Amino acid sequence: MNGIPYSSAAERNRQPILDQLRDLLPDEGTVLEIGSGTGQHAAFFCRNLPGLRWQPSDRAANLAGLEACFSNEGNDRILPVLELDVLGDAWPDRSYEGVYSANTAHIMPWQAVVAMFAGVSRRLVSGARFVLYGPFNLDGEYTSESNAEFDRRLRAGDPHMGLRDLAAIQDLANQHQMPLKQRRAMPANNFILVFEKS
């Protein structure tokens, strides 16, 4: 596909996520996306949220695919792709009016999840939101058998991966002055978690 990456899951979930983002993100400002992956979310959201500028980011290996995706888009509100490894020191030296990340917490090692929350907290303006999408366990339990099987596959491939428990995520967010304000159930046994910088 001309070097442009594609995810069928991103194509399926983009509209339900957009429906939630309309009242979770500000009308104007710049949103940092952590782990932009194929770029499909960034392109679709920026197209449909006309007051926002979107800062895509990912690790070095994914940058070429993202740039190919956005070159077709021709949207100057999608900012140049930023190389960002949450465990590194090279976080952008600026503040954001929102941060978004999808399907990252379960594929990062836990130390990277910790680093992500620390970095987001330092760069969110007061009162702004961090919107985190993906599958999570509740009270130590899987919310579906499909999530249990997904978790087993992740851990078999890499023991540092795996679904995170909401209580552990909440504790982490509280440590970084970003209490959980909302939990919204989403299709396919996923959630949107909404943290707000205090």
Image: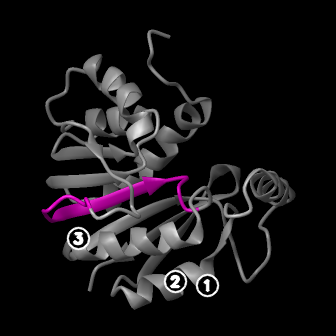
- The quarter of the picture where residue 36 lies is top left
Residue 41 visible in this rendered orientation of the protein = no
Task: Mark 3: give few (<14), some (14-19) or many (20+) Cα within 10 Å.
Answer: many
Residue at left offset 35%, top offset 62%: 88
- The quarter of the picture where residue 174 lies is bottom left
Q: Residue 84 at what x, y percent from top left?
A: 33, 52
Name the residue beneath numbered marker 3.
124
Distance, label 2 to label 1, CA atoms, is 5 Å
Three-letter residue code for mark 1:
Ala
Residue at left offset 59%, top offset 65%: 109
Colour mapping used in the image? one colour
Name the residue beneath numbered marker 2.
170
Horizontally, residue 125 falls left or right of residue 142, namely: left
Q: Do the residues bearing badges 2 and 1 touch, measured as CB atoms within 8 Å?
A: yes
Q: Residue 103 at what x, y percent from top left?
A: 55, 52
Residue at left offset 27%, top offset 32%: 47
Distance, label 3 to label 2, CA atoms, is 17 Å
Rendered position, 107 above or below 123: above
Rendered position, 61 above or below 114: above
Q: Residue 25 at what x, y percent from top left?
A: 28, 59
Three-letter residue code for mark 3:
Leu
Name the residue beneath numbered marker 1.
167
Magenta residues (range): 90-105
Helix or strand or loop: what does disc 1 sit on? helix
Residue 10 visible in this rendered orientation of the protein = yes
Q: Earlier in the sequence, mark 3 or mark 1?
A: 3
